């Protein structure tokens, strides 16, 4: 089971000034359908199991590029450059190898987890491209859009 949202520990860490989202190295790692990740209890990337593996995907995921920080009313948000993995093959049609979740974490702070994203329906890739489109300041209501070709 995946519980989406901002990691509770990240919120506590922010009160202590731990994360610098504009200066630290932030990554997105992908996890398969066997992963169990609860945003209310998870703290470190290193404690997670069932990260995706296969050609076209590197363990640890991709580095995110922050392009803007914005507010919508009282809610903060950030725009992240889109990410694309090309030719991803995670083991054919084996459902356990399908992508189910993404975890945003801070490598500059010992792998502290920032957020957990449940992609909903598992994504099976057989030498396909995977693109993650992030919201921008002009339309932050679109939390993120996942597409594969």
Image (cartoon, rainbow, N blue to C red):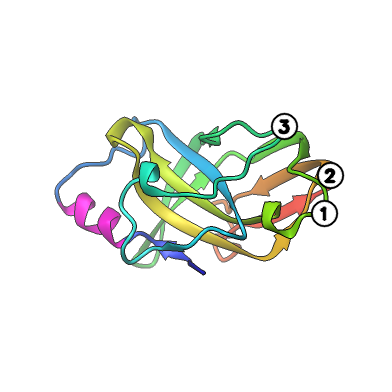
Q: Dot 1: what SS?
A: loop
Disc 3 crowd, CA 10 A, few/some/many (<14, 14-19, 20+): some
In this view, the residue farthest toward the left is 16
Disc 2 crowd, CA 10 A, few/some/many (<14, 14-19, 20+): some
Q: Residue at 22% of width from left, 51% of height from top? A: 14
Magenta part of the protein: which range? Answer: 8-15
CB of mark 3 within 8 Å of CB of mark 1? no
Magenta segment: does it hold 71?
A: no
Q: How far across and how far down the image is residue 68, in percent?
A: 47, 42
Magenta segment: does it hold 14?
A: yes
Of marks 3 and 1, the one in the foreground:
1
3 or 1: tag closer to the N-terminus: 3
Q: Dot 3: what SS?
A: loop
Q: Report how far apart the C-alphas of labels 3 and 1 lie in the structure.
A: 16 Å
| Mark 2, residue position | 126
Q: How far across and how far down the image is residue 96, in percent?
A: 68, 57
Q: How far across and how far down the image is residue 145, in percent?
A: 67, 57
Q: Looking at the picture, tell me which residue is in the foreground, 25 or 80.
A: 25
CB of mark 1 within 8 Å of CB of mark 2? yes
Where, by quadrant of the figure, is residue 122 drawn? bottom right
| Mark 1, residue position | 93
2 or 3: tag closer to the N-terminus: 3
| Mark 3, residue position | 56
């Amino acid at each position: 089971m995946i519980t989406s949202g901002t990691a509770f520990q990240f919120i506590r860490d922010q009160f202590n000034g731990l994360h610098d989202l504009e200066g630290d190295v932030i990554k997105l790692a992908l996890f398969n359908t066997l992963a169990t990740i609860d945003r209310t209890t998870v703290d470190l990337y290193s404690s997670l199991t069932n990260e995706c593996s296969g050609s076209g995907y590197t363990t640890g995921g991709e580095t995110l590029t922050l392009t803007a920080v914005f507010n919508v009313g009282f809610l903060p948000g950030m725009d992240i450059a889109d990410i694309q993995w090309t030719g991803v093959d995670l083991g054919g049609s084996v459902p356990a190898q399908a992508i189910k979740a993404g975890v945003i974490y801070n490598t500059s702070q010992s792998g502290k987890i920032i957020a957990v994203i449940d992609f909903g329906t598992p994504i099976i890739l057989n030498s396909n491209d995977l693109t993650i489109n992030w919201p921008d300041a002009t339309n932050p209501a679109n939390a993120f859009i996942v597409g594969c070709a």
